[in-house]
Image: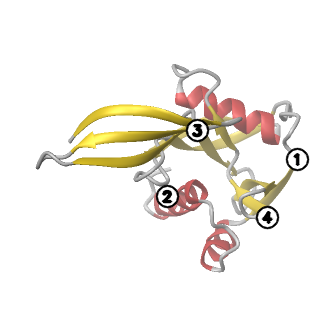
Amino acid sequence: MELLNRKLVFKGHRVEVYEDELKVDDGRICHYDYVHNRNGAGMLLVDDSGEEDKLIFVKQFRNTLGKDDIEIPAGCQNFPEEDFLVCALREAEEETGLIPEKTYYLTKIIAAVGIFGEMTAIYIGTGLKKGRVQRDEDEYIDVITMTLDEAVEAIYGGRIIDSKTIIAILAYKDMKTGGRL
């Protein structure tokens, strides 16, 4: 395939929507929608100071759902070249007031690769120390904790539906049971 043209059809507060014109291998011309947003990063924070690990999440209203959602702290890069880990650490501290001493890179994902280009890097952070909460003016967040078992149950019970959060929880469970942490 060859991208022939990309035309901006909508510019919103956070995203841009483009109509792409592509030439496919047999010569036909096809049109696709492409939604652009800045890349970002998120981090599953784990309080491993007690007998049982506590996973730290943010609960916030999501207008796309019309209700609160439970997620790992995450956000967009401040500029395109910003390091993903720097972004994840900043967002974790801003949203929860916690800073991990150790971080583990998991993966990068695109939540809906057929239409979105936004890439999100996912990390795990342990050895938490106090930092400073500095939420954006439009962020209304409650910090909540769960055990690993409670978080897994929340996935299968439909209470955690955010893809980056599900990936972080299940990867953490795999790494923990596999002795890779």
Disc nearer the start of the sequence (1/4) = 4
Q: Hey, what amino acid is under mark 2?
A: Ala
Residue placed at 62% from the left, 60% from the top? Answer: 162
Furthest residue toward bottom: 157
Q: Give the residue number, with chain letter if any, for mark 1.
A: 140
Residue placed at 60% from the left, 26% from the top? Answer: 86
Q: Hey, what amino acid is under mark 3?
A: Ala
Q: Secondary structure at mark 4?
A: loop
Q: Mark 4 or mark 2, which is nearer to you?
A: 4
Q: Give the residue number, with chain letter if any, for mark 4.
A: 66
Crowd around label 2: few <14 · some 14–19 · many ≥20 (10 Å) = some
Q: Give the residue number, with chain letter if any, for mark 2.
A: 171
Residue placed at 19% from the left, 46% from the top? Answer: 24
Q: Secondary structure at mark 2?
A: helix
Q: Quadrant of residue 74?
A: top right
Observer-nearest of 95 and 178: 95
Q: Which mark is residue 41?
A: 3
- Say if 94 sits above or below 122 in the image: above
What is the spatial separation of the Cα atoms under label 4 and label 3, in whole angstroms?
A: 23 Å
Left or right of 44? Residue 136 is right
Furthest residue toward left: 26
What is the spatial separation of the Cα atoms under label 2 and label 1, in whole angstroms?
A: 27 Å
Observer-nearest of 39 and 92: 39
Crowd around label 3: few <14 · some 14–19 · many ≥20 (10 Å) = many
Observer-nearest of 21 and 63: 21
Q: Which mark is residue 158?
A: none
Left or right of 121? Residue 53 is right
What is the spatial separation of the Cα atoms under label 4 and label 2, in whole angstroms?
A: 28 Å
- Say if 77 sits above or below 79 in the image: below
